[in-house]
Image (cartoon, rainbow, N blue to C red):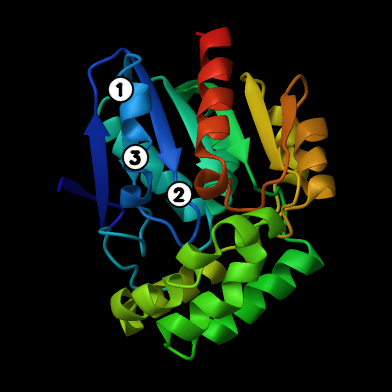
């Protein structure tokens, strides 16, 4: 798998497709480039190149030697785009990746053609801070099954729990096999990178076409938080996915792809 050293850390990426239009996907905090493997054909078949990226401390990218602010990922992304000679891209960021996308748009807007933000926030509310701290405490147990049992109720909607219970109840056992101490230590650094995150007053600087996607039953990034982004980015579009929780990529992949493709086609 290709990696390039950027700002002192090996950054793993996967670039697929041959189209002129490039879609960059930025992961949620517990995701990796591999999380999107089933999404890629939908875009490649429609003429897009898709760039999947693992942030430092995530997936197959290297570990950071110390703690860092979320802004570090925006600098790493710029370095990667420069390395790949990608001067104008579409960016889709979900949750943690949406935060990085907004920081990148504020700092390096000339690189962006269209911006798509899903299940994310422009600051760290007391609710999100409390959720983050509880997840960090669960991570310190270094127990994959325990960790999944703690976070699952926050990630998925009531409807998804009822429809997919047989699958969901297997996840803790699976994650217990793949999450080791290094993964948890990396996760904690990623989580703490948001301690000072707040771009609320800078959202007005973003002028590229922007789509804000809310999930109706998202407990982690609720309606009020995402409305703040929509109102802060003038002219942005806003849409809500019904009967869906924070993990929209897992619960409603078809609807999510339709929204992204439709928005990109509108501004192509």
Residue appearing at x 53%, y 61% in the figure: 69
Disc 1 vs disc 2: which is toward the camera?
1
Dot 1: element = helix
* Residue, disc 2: 27
Task: Give the camera-side residue of 173 and 44.
Answer: 173
The tally of labels here is 3
Whole-angstrom CA distance, mark 2 to mark 3, is: 14 Å
Q: Is residue 260 left or right of residue 2?
A: right
The picture quadrant where one finds residue 44 is: top left
Residue appearing at x 40%, y 27% in the figure: 23
Whole-angstrom CA distance, mark 1 to mark 2, is: 19 Å
Q: Residue 233: tell me if it is visible.
A: yes
Q: Disc number at residue 77?
A: none
The picture quadrant where one finds residue 123 is: bottom right
* Residue, disc 3: 38
The picture quadrant where one finds residue 208 is: top right
Disc 1 to disc 3: CB gap under 8 Å = no
* Mark 1 surroundings: few (<14), some (14-19) or many (≥20) residues within 10 A: some
* Residue, disc 1: 44
Residue 245 lies, in percent from the top left, at 66, 52
Can you say whether 254 is above or below 19 in the image? below
Residue appearing at x 49%, y 59% in the figure: 29
Disc 1 vs disc 3: which is toward the camera?
3
Dot 3: element = loop
Whole-angstrom CA distance, mark 1 to mark 3, is: 11 Å
Residue at the extreme left: 1
Residue 191 lies, in percent from the top left, at 54, 68
């Amino acid at each position: 798998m290709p990696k390039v050293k950027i700002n002192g850390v090996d950054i793993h990426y996967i670039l697929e497709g041959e189209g002129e239009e490039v879609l960059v996907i930025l992961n949620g905090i517990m995701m990796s480039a591999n999380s999107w493997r089933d999404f890629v054909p939908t875009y490649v078949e429609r003429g897009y190149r898709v760039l999947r990226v693992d942030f430092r401390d995530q997936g197959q990218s290297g570990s950071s030697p110390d703690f860092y602010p979320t802004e570090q990922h925006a600098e790493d992304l710029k370095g990667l785009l420069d390395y790949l000679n990608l001067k104008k891209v579409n960016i889709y960021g979900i949750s943690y990746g949406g935060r990085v996308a907004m920081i990148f748009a504020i700092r390096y807007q000339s690189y962006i053609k269209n911006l798509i933000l899903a299940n994310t926030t422009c600051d760290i509310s007391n609710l999100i801070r409390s959720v983050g701290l509880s997840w960090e405490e669960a991570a310190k147990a270094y127990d994959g099954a325990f960790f999944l049992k703690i976070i699952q109720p926050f990630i998925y909607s009531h409807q998804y729990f009822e429809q997919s219970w047989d699958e969901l109840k297997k996840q803790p056992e699976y994650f217990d096999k793949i999450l080791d101490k290094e993964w948890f230590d990396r996760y904690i650094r990623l989580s703490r990178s948001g301690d000072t995150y707040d771009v609320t007053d800078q959202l007005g600087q973003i002028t590229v076409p922007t789509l804000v996607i809310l999930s109706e039953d998202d407990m982690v990034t609720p309606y009020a938080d995402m409305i703040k982004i929509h109102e802060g980015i003038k002219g942005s579009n806003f849409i809500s996915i019904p009967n869906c929780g924070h993990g929209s990529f897992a619960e409603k992949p078809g609807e999510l792809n339709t929204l992204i493709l439709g928005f990109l086609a509108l501004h192509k």
